Image (spheres, rainbow, N blue to C red):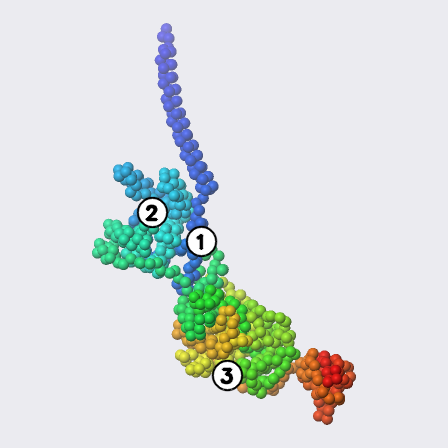
Amino acid sequence: MRPYPDIRGHAAALWRRTARLRGHGAVLWGLAAALSGLAALFLTLRALDLALPPPIEAGRAVSLVVADRDGRALRAFPVEEGRWRLAADLDRIDPAFIEALLAVEDRRFHDHHGVDMLALMRAAGQAVTSGRIRSGGSTITMQTARLLEPRPNRTLGAKLAEILRAWQLERRLSKDEILELYLTLAPYGGNLQGVRAASWAWFGREPDQLTPDQIALLIALPQAPEARRPDRRPDAARAARARLLQRMVRLDLISQARALDAADEALPERRQAFPARAWHAAETIRAGAGGAAEVRSTLDSRLQGEAERLMAALVAAAGPEVQASALIVEIETRAVRAAVGSAGRDRAGGWMDLTDRRRSPGSALKPLIYALAFDDGAAAASTRIADLPARFASYRPENFDRTFHGEVTVADALQHSLNVPAVRLLDRVGAARFTASLAQAGGTPLVPGAHGGEAGLAVGLGGLGLSARDLALVYAALGDDGLARPLVWTHAALDEPAPAPVRLVSASSAREVLTILEGSPAPPGRMPAQLASGAPAIGYKTGTSYGYRDAWAAGVAGGYAIVVWTGRPDGAPRPGMTGRAAALPALFDLFDSVARIDRRFAARARPRHAPSVAAPSPLDRFARADAPPEILFPPDGSEIWADEPGRGFVLSGRGERGLAWYADGAPVPRDAGGSPVWTPDGPGFYELAAVDAAGRAARVRVRVRTPAG
């Protein structure tokens, strides 16, 4: 008989097995809880990351720097509250500075993910053993986070926030981007932020090549920017620089001898000015810059410097109330290579960009009148044209010297800026068409009063408002075979597809006009229309507005168009100051500067064209073709005194094919010489009419008065 089983032993074994299972379950439950906790932490961090992203864009609001065509800074603009914060670019910062900065501030920068745990533990240990904070253990990423969101107190909570932000920054930016952001925001005292602003303020240049003493100062300053400012705390700055130099020795960045030499270098005693050249041109470029940190302009810093110097010399000799402006445009690309809005902000009008103000151009637009007339087949260079007193309705132009030269060639009339021939040609071209051509070319002419028609013929002699930029468009078009294009101010615009040009005048007319202008009388002391260097001839024209308010000179040579204006910014007259006397010498000086600086100037000279020798027979002499009749005497609205009964008056008019005269509808008889002689019936009002063979009539209303009434 088998013994009865040991129930207690089985029960004990079962209990032990169950206990083991419970232990495994606890471990599993613990692991599951830990994983759940980590997942929850990750999800929480992820939610925080998405809900509270770091304010990176706020740190990217930087000062705009306008540079020249080669990248040299011309002018910088501060950000809000007048702070200077120039965007850092590692490719344009001395590598020795970057190496020293990382070695001193964050040697494991490229290895950690925003937080250097070893540095934090070292800082904590130093604080415990010394009883005070000796180092913060902050990485460059953490310092960048602190600069993006400054906190007044260095508490544990603030440190945890920096750690979170550092992690966020590392997730969003590359190491180079983080370093550039730090070097953009780092404080350097006062209103200086970033290494570029500090380098300009203390050393007067970009931080692309730095000496050891400069490197040490630029690393030491952000650690205590106000306490170590070299202009206010030179002793503290010198001591901090010396300590940094010794640390660089311990890090094997420089030798002890170089460190000692660098420590003896003089500190900068005062802040230097930020770049402030091409003041007004930079404002124009800034208007279209958007949020860019730097805009590379088309300006040539050498030409800009020459233009500023020459304009300053011009106004210094002219008097304290005088200003001047100038534009230098490369014709091939329409790139503005130099622009002087005014000759000094310390003078009246110095804050105004006078290249963009509309003033009367005087005779400076006459070349366009002649080119349009050539296009119409109305005249040629050798066409004979009358420079005699003439009236166009109520408009009676006179020459500048109030003399007339009889019959002259069109070329002579343009070279000597005769007014009556220019108005005769404009009368044929049409004032409305003339102003429309200016607008079509991209200009913004301001035409006061009546538009077009005979009443608008004064626009040809300066009776409209035009800016130096508008005038540059016209002369650049003449130098480009009559094609008008907009001016270009930025390097980026040069890389874009050029807009389709506008045909202002034909290529042949543009060349003919420039050939005539190249023969214009040169200013005193110059070869005829030639540069001092003997380079290509200049095709130029001057202009003087009514009352000597504006003096102009504009010209084309060597692939460039240049415009010079001088006058008083308030528009007050300057008696005797003509474009030839006040502006033309500066125009030639500017062309001399271009010839010295641009080696392609002579090679790009316009091919010389011989002037037209003889016009075709229909263009031997200019006539007002198909013009309507015009009554010269008596003028409309006039009063005529008939002091004797039966006195007759000889009527005078202009018409293409003879005129028939009428007084109150009755034919006016002619005398033995064929002249119409009108004898009023007595005092009163009369209407006189002159009718040509085509039936076109001109009428005037006059009043006849006698001693009796």
Q: Which residue, given by chain and number where applicable, does mark 2 sit on?
A: 109
Position of 558 relative to 657 (above/below): above
Q: Quadrant of the N terminus?
A: top left
Q: Which residue, given by chain and number where applicable, does mark 3 sit on?
A: 610
Q: Amino acid at mark 3?
A: Ala
Q: Residue at x 39, y 25 (%)?
A: 26
Q: Nearer the viewer, residue 65 or 665?
A: 665
**Percent position (x, y) of residue 159?**
37, 41
Badge 1, how many Cα within 10 Å: few under 14, some, many 20+? few
Q: Are marks 3 and 1 in contact (CB under 8 Å)?
A: no
Q: Amino acid at mark 2?
A: Phe
Q: Is residue 621 left or right of residue 194?
A: right
Q: Are marks 2 and 1 in contact (CB under 8 Å)?
A: no
Position of 200 relative to 602 (above/below): above
Q: Residue at x 59, y 76 (%)?
A: 458
Q: Secondary structure at mark 3?
A: loop
Q: Which residue reaches farthest left?
A: 257
Q: Secondary structure at mark 2?
A: loop
Q: Amino acid at mark 1?
A: Glu
Q: Which residue, given by chain and number where applicable, does mark 1 sit on?
A: 80
Which of disc 3 and disc 2 is earlier in sequence? 2
